[in-house]
Image (cartoon, coloured by chain):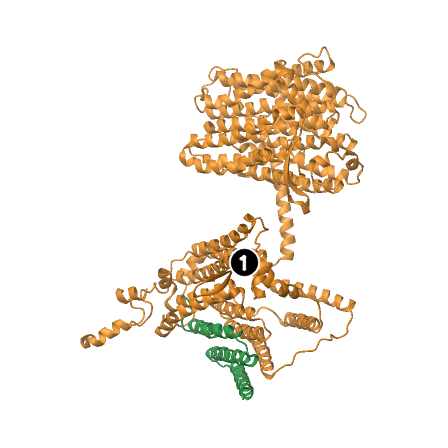
Amino acid sequence: MIEHALVFGFAAVSLALLMNLWRLVTGPTLMDRVLAADTMVINAIALIILFGIQMRTTVYFEAALLFAMFGFISTVAYCRFVLRGDIIE
Amino acid sequence: MSLALIVMLPFLGAVLPALMIRAGRNACAIATGSVTLLAFALLLTHVPAVLRGEVIQAGWTWLPGLGLNVNFFLDGLGLLFAGLILGIGLLIIAYARFYLAKEDPMGTFYTFLLLFQGAMVGIVLSDNILLLLIFWELTSLSSFLLIGYWRHLPEGRQGARMALAVTGAGGLAMIAGMLMLGGIVGSYDLTVILRERELIQASPLYLPALVLILVGCFAKSAQFPFHFWLPHAMAAPTPVSAYLHSATMVKAGIFLMARMWPVLAGTEAWFYLVATTGLVTMVLGAGIALFKDDLKGLLAFSTVSHLGLVTLLLGFGTPMAAVVAVFHIINHASFKAALFMCAGIVDHEAGTRDVRRLGGLAALMPITATLVTVGAASMAGVPLLNGFLSKEMMLEEAVHTTWAGQGWIVPLAVTAGAAFSVAYSFRYIVHVFFGRRRDDYPRTPHDPPAGMWLPPAVLIVPVVAIGLFPETFAGDLVRASAAAVTGGVLPEFQLALWHGFTVALALSVIALAGGFALLARYRAVRRLWQAGPHPEAKAMFEAVLAATVAASRRVMHGLHNGSLGRYLAVTLVAALALGLAAFQAGGHEAGLRDSLPAPAAAVVAWLLLVGACGLAVVLHRQRVLALLAAGVVGLIVSVGFVYLSAPDLALTQISVEVATVILILLALYFLPKESPRESGRGRKLRDAALAVGAGLGMGGLAWAAMTRDAATLSGYYLDNAVSGGGGTNVVNVILVDFRGFDTFGEIIVLGVAALAIYALLDGAVRGAVGRKLAAWTPDEPHSADRHPMIMVVATRVMLPLALMVGAYIFLRGHNQPGGGFIAGLVVAIALIMQYMASGFGWAAQRMRVDYHAMIGAGVLIAAATGIAAMVMGYPFLTSAFDHFHLPLIGEFELASALAFDVGVFLTVVGAVMLALANLSRLGRKTGVAPVNEAPMDVDPLARRQAAARPAASGASARHDQPAPAPTAAREG
């Protein structure tokens, strides 16, 4: 059962990543692209977790943890940059 | 051991004066003097053994692979020079105490003096020519500092620069010569080299080595044509001139010629190079000295002349001439240092040292006048004084020397030189101290305090003592040091006052008479001199220097024009050419290894990589987009590391990506948001072709490497990580254990880089950049949300969690993915979040960590871990580990590498935070908004109070308004 779920999961996340790529390339605004990159990070977390389940190991868990913890900081930095210019005032 | 101590004492003691100056000038001088006295006393303990003919040795191997050993040895020659350096050094220290004015920084002076002294003693005691070269360069550097001591005087600075340039250039030639010499013999140890006379003189490299070494010696000892720097170095304070430019540094070249005498002397090349240079220098220096009005200038050229005399004697190449050379070194050091000090006294007390403005001082300064009369008479070669003896013996040697088949050239020239010498010596006496007393001295002259005249007086004692009883006072020392020069064989000789009626005596009388005649008709002689040509050495030197600088600048700017594109193109073309050449030389069959399967998700990731790269290429001019595209590439690379089983790398990459984005965005705030168009079509095509070629080449190379099986180092690390390093995470064990030394170097580099960022930005914001920043207005419209509440709250909640993750990753690093480096990045990012949310000023007020100290502590802890291993008797950074048992926690393992990892951790956190803090400081310099007092724009407490009091409904706290203090206190 888990095998099928994994196949589905990988397919869905891959498709999502491709859509992110589409948004990243076409834009049109900077914020569209920042959001696309941010969503890519979310999907990357999913990919790593799925891969861990597939390999039956917890070794990759920390990578996902770091992404989850810090992935948003780049996005925030871009937002601050667009909104305020200086990201550390 | 005590030999090394004699050399090291002045270096170690050099910190003393700098510290003791706070306790006063006397304490400073006494501290300096006691350092030298101690070294001198240590040296004296070796005197009996050396006079018996023993050679004392001490040393350690330092870099045996390079032949560089810390070896010292003490023989007669070393004893003579070390005695001169330390003994006269002691007198100079006493003299300088009274010479230097109140406003001169005395601690600095004594520190420089001790550094110089240590370097000098190092030269004369080194038993390894590479070590000797190090000390040689140190004397050039420390004398540069001493000559330029009065840094407010332009002549001082120029003289210092000239001395450094000339002696430094000579030093370079000498390095080459010494390396050749070492290459011929196969050892850099002096005691070994000195035994290989036949081998060296038979070698085809003998002549180049000889010429190069002599250039170094001549430059240092101010021999023609390098003599011009010495008079300009007279801008130094008189104690420096007396010490460096009469007794010690200028004798370093002489010392080295004497030291190398056994293996280099005795050939035609040696005779014509050394003796001719010495002869020319001697006559030229004496001639110019006669016409110098500055007392120190007169003495400087006299020194040049006397050094020429010693060089001449060494150049003769006969053992007896070497004996005379050594004898004259002793005599010259005693009277010349005394005369320099007296010149300083005259300058100090009469206010000028211009001979034309002096005269008739004998009655006003009787003590000084007596000292100068005795010293200068010795310099002139008047009987009953030591200068007479060595000059007489020199004339005796000169009479027996033929130059190019002509027996009369050398005697004639040296007699002329001696006559000049008599004339200028007596000019010093007569024109300064005798004649009519004047009433226009700049100051009222009188004898100085005893502290100032005693040091020269002490030196005048041997002038008379040796002059009267040469064999008693100097016989043993001359024999011991001359034996060291000649390598053991010494002719029978007796130092005596009376040698009978000889040709030398006749020449001596002629010289005295000629000298007096010259002085009697001084005006006429001087007119004659002034009619002749006077090449200005300084102008020529400056011209040569300017031409050299201009030429090297042309070459440099031709190669290094600042275009990064050009450098990259050159590098890529070179790499492509090399790669292509290698590709054509090798076989072209495909690799045999099976390729890995490519699941759909991996293909998608690859597509993302390609898409992001393409985006960067198309949109690279919009810098934020380029950064975003690079971020996506980083993301995929991180995922790739996970997929290809490199979790450590993945963790590092993820954190580095975040830090990079923040750093670049901080800098981008002040930079144009779009790159200008700079390259034309042709250039773009060229760059594209290069990029594609290099990319394809690199890809092909990677493909070829990965489709083949090859033995790598990985196997060794995998096998030994647990047994050797006590950790199951091989990556971490490599970092902190197997290649700990590498990591140690890297964290130092990281710390230095962060400090450099600090230094550059700190300097920048003070100057023109600072003014530009203060006048800076943002080029984009800004949102009013300065510190949004959602972000403040989220990051506050995240902080303990993130720190927890950091601690977790750090602790488990040795056995599972993680370690100090990643943990450092994680903690740094967790802290940066706070800065971003509430602003730098607000966060910095609440987080008072000195990041400089953090970097330093990190490096020190790492070093201490390594040194602890050395203390236990293992090589640097050997790690140890053991298993412990604690209740509740259970069995765990503790490795010393963990302490090392703490060092890495601290350095990383400190470096990242320091870099960020300084970049964000630029933003604060713009003065767009003041530091906020509250952590966020919205103040929930104020709003609740406002809701409770309907009357004040309009008074909700809004952006940028200072919030009530209680809130800030609670948040902090």
Residue A85 horizontal/vertical position (percent): 42, 69
Q: Nearer the viewer, residue B582 or B520?
A: B582
Nearest the viewer among B607 and B419 is: B607
How crowded is the residue under tag 1: few (<14 C-alpha within 10 Å), some, or many (20+)? some
Q: Which quadrant of the figure contains the C terminus of chain B?
A: bottom left
Describe residue B439's horizontal placement relative to residue B336 as left or right. Answer: left
Q: Which residue is mark 1?
A: B881
Do we see residue B971 in this rendering?
A: yes
Q: Is residue B967 above or below residue B207?
A: below
Residue appearing at x 29%, y 71% in the figure = B939
> The chain coloured green carries which letter?
A
The quadrant where residue B408 appears = top right
Is B846 drawn above or below residue B228 in the view shown? Answer: below
Please give left or right for residue B428 compared with residue B758 in the image. right
**As rendered, which of B455 and A73 lies closer to the eye?**
A73
Image quarter of the N terminus of chain B: top right
Place residue B44 in its image quadrant. Answer: top right
Question: Can you say whether B900 is above or below B968 in the image?
Answer: above
Picture coordinates of residue A38, whole percent (x, y): 48, 77
Please indicate whether residue B648 sits to the left or right of residue B470 in the image.
Answer: left
A49 or B719: nearer the eye? B719
Q: Identify the element where label 1 is drawn.
A: strand
- Residue lying at the far top of the rendered structure: B501
Q: Position of residue B571 (x, y in %)?
A: 66, 63
Chain B: colour as depicted: orange
Amino acid type, residue under disc 1 in the picture: Phe
The chain under label 1 reads B
Compared across the picture, whether B295 is left or right of B566 comes to: left
